[in-house]
Amino acid sequence: MTTGKIMSFDEAAALIADGDVVTVSSSSGLNCPDRMLRAIGERFAREGHPRDITSLHPIAAGDMYGIKGIDHIAKAGLLARAIAGSYPSGPSSAESPEIWKMIERNAIAAYNVPSGILFDMHREVAAKRAGVMTKVGIGTYVDPDLQGSAMNAAGAAAPIVRKIAFEGEDWLYFPNIAPNVAILRATTADEDGNLSMEHEGAYLGAMDLALAARNSGGIVIAQVKRVCARHTIPTQRVFVPSNLVDVIVVDPEQVQATQTIYDPAISGEIRRPMSSFEPDPFNAEKVVARRAAMELLSGGAANLGFGISALVPGILLEEGLHGQVTWVIEQGAVGGLPLTGFVFGCAANAEAIVPAPYQFIYFQGGGFDVSLLSFMEVDTAGNVNVSRLAAKPHVTAGCGGFVDITAHARKLVFSGFFRAGGLDLEVGGGRLAIRREGKFPKFVPAVEHVTFAGARAAGRDILYITERCVIRLMPEGLTVVEIAPGIDLDKEVLAQAAIPLKVSPDIKTMDSRLFTDAPMQLCLPVRPSRIVAARERARA
């Protein structure tokens, strides 16, 4: 038996009781306490305990590309309920995550709650307030008038959110869910349990989760890479203090992120030369990302989502405009160059890394200038689905921060291809040609999941950018405002949508530079000064 706070993984797993609520700090393969989750699954395989636990995941735990995360505990009898901002996705049906299999066969009650709301829930339960009351999610699948965040029939049978009236307005109310156990991840723990994050690309909500468990009478388990002597972590580097940490488990092999053992530029310890970043190849995805980049303002702050939009920072770098826009990512990075692939959610050379809950407060209130996001489906009302496709459940991860980000954003740019399934495009020479049309329309009569509610877009600037056209959500409906050079409006746009699209009388041709394999010489308009606006208000 070990002494003090340092324990083996088996000893730590033995502390979790049947029926416990276990909250986990992670973001897919970033900052995931994977070895601790594996130990819980291994204990269940040996002993049949713990049973019937509820798992909370403000962002996904695991991504199935090397870090399994929640899949370690996705076992019948062990997991009874999962409430997550997102879930791991798999690369193919043959590798469908176990958690999705359980969701699909109603083996657990499953919910997809926006990440920011889940962080709010932890703070509210920690402060012993009444729960979360929010307008984030109204009109979307989060709303009880639709799915109420439930991802399956078992979830729908046990609602976790209600719509209530307060001061003459509708609000969504999430009652408290108190965790018995919080599982965190850090880089270093001292012998007392102080935690530092020097090798992490994000801090996520570790402090909030620890407070929620501690103030609910629960325990906090911290997985770390190494242990140092007490009092040797500099005070200002302690992210979670020792009085909130009960157990330390050590995994010397823990990686920084999926397929990334350690990159000091991700954790802000060095600055990588900008010349070391290679430009993305010229293709249709880059065309869409270039057009999205044209919606940015120099001096502005822009949020960035997964998918084609993640290419936009590389566009600015290639155009010599890096640094003109401050990128803000839900995992907490501010500034720098957001990264793509397995380390999405991290930024190289970030100006700051803030705890994710604070970033989500910024997002929920619409503090940024524009968000560049993706879409799987768009319908007649301008609703967007990114959270669920029944035909491919294992490759859709849920909403993550999408609902929080879009709730009050002043400007939203959704990017994606016009059709899906075998689409073959030829791009070059300032033009676009469709060699083979996609099998499936993405502009449809009704989306399967409403992740963004078009009905709540009044007064906001909403664009849908595709390889062949740009569509704006206007009071009269979805309206084609730009068309790619080389594309036939009637045959290749209007006839290829599964819904009627309106056409602007002032329709323009998309800039031919978008379709040419060379830098565009892009110039961004300057964001109006907040100082000038403040002076004008003061004079008034």
Image (spheres, rainbow, N blue to C red):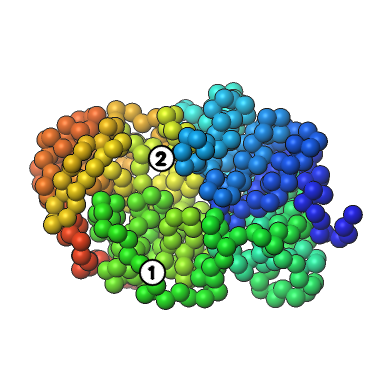
Q: Amino acid at mark 1?
A: Phe
Mark 2 vs 1, N-terminal side: 1
Name the quarter where the N terminus is drawn.
Answer: bottom right
At horizontal 67% and vertical 39% (from top left) the residue drawn is 73
Determine which residue is flagged by label 2: 386
Closer to the camera: disc 2 or disc 1?
A: 1
Q: Amino acid at mark 2?
A: Val
Camera sees residue 295: no
Q: Could you say where residue 480 lies in the image, as x and y percent from the top left?
A: 18, 42
Quadrant in the rendering for residue 446: top left
Q: Could you say where residue 46 lies in the image, as x and y percent from the top left?
A: 79, 37
Determine contact: label 2, label 1, CB under 8 Å.
no
Who is closer to the viewer here, 462 or 47? Answer: 47
Q: Could you say where residue 198 lies in the image, as x and y percent from the top left?
A: 62, 69
SS state under label 2: loop
Query: On screen, 367 above or below 532?
Result: above
Camera sees residue 93: yes
At horizontal 38% and vertical 62% (from top left) the residue drawn is 301
10 Å crowding of disc 1: few (<14), some (14-19), many (20+): few
SS state under label 1: loop
Q: Could you say where residue 152 lies in the image, as x and y percent from the top left?
A: 54, 27
At horizontal 88% and vertical 59% (from top left) the residue drawn is 3
Quadrant in the rendering for residue 16: top right
Query: On screen, 285 above or below 177?
Result: below
Tell me: 507 left or right of 12. left
Name the quarter where the C terminus is drawn.
Answer: bottom left
Who is closer to the viewer here, 435 or 230? Answer: 435
Determine which residue is flagged by label 1: 277
Tell me: 46 left or right of 292. right
